[in-house]
Image (cartoon, helix red, strand yellow):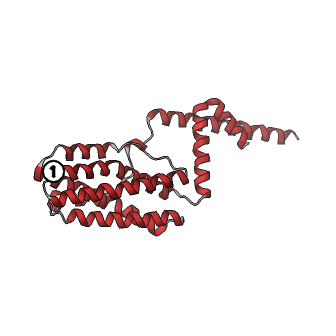
Amino acid sequence: MVAGLLAVAGAACPVAGIALASQSSSQARAESQGIEKLDREFLTVIRFANLWEIPMGELAEERGSTQTVKDVGKVLAQDHTQLNTAVAQLAEQFDVKLPDQPTSSQKSWMADISSKEGVKFDQTFADRLRAAHGTVFGLIAEVRAGTRNATIRDFAQQANNIVMKHMTLLEGTGDVTADHGMFAEASARTTAYPENSLGSSDLLVGGIVVLVMIATTLVVVRTFSTRGSAE
């Protein structure tokens, strides 16, 4: 029955069938290696952070109006480059597909920081990066405390140390204040990235596959019921 349902679903919508089979296969391999949903989310979030914080760190090293901001930018860029190498290796090991572009929100933050000069640049850079590190800090702690995978736990510990260091450095610039309103954002972590959301076409295909599978199940059940009554 299961084989029949998969065959019908694949025939009704080959692209969706292939995508579902690939996703199931990937998830099965990951779960067999001890990777859970939160672990995969963790790797994805770290990758997103690297994608925008590396260039912003490099920009701060170049454009910061004080040596402190320049130094902090350099450290952030270097540390996130190391994290980026590590997360790429883990993603390959555990078959996790990573994004190759920052989120739309992160792109807007990059544009905002890049548009500033002088002291205003320092404040915007430090404020925004401090808020971002605070936001991801909770997820890292959650993974560090709860993951069943020793490799992911070790990486979470590494990320935890780096994020704590970065928050301390950013606060040490003197450009991060609660008055700027970004501390509040640290408690509002969300993984609803636009890049990870299903589009209308994806939902339509999924709905069609579900309807086909339901219809096929009913036909199979009725067929067996009819045969049983006849016998």
Q: Quadrant of the C terminus?
A: top right
Q: Which of 56 and 199 is in front in this view?
A: 56
Give the left or right position of residue 213, taking residue 58 as reference: right
Give the left or right position of residue 10, taking residue 59 as reference: right
Q: Quadrant of the N terminus?
A: top right
Secondary element at image label 1: helix
Number of labelled discs?
1
Residue 32 % position (x, y):
62, 57
Residue 105 % position (x, y):
30, 45
Residue lying furthest bottom: 145
Residue 106 % position (x, y):
30, 46
Residue 185 visible = no
Q: For the point 15% across and 64% down, which residue is it?
A: 174
Give the left or right position of residue 110, taking residue 217 as reference: left
Mark 1 residue crowding within 10 angstroms, few (<14) / some (14–19) / many (20+)? many
Q: Which residue in the structure is indicated by mark 1?
A: 121
Residue 63 % position (x, y):
17, 49
Amino acid carrying mark 1 in the image: Phe
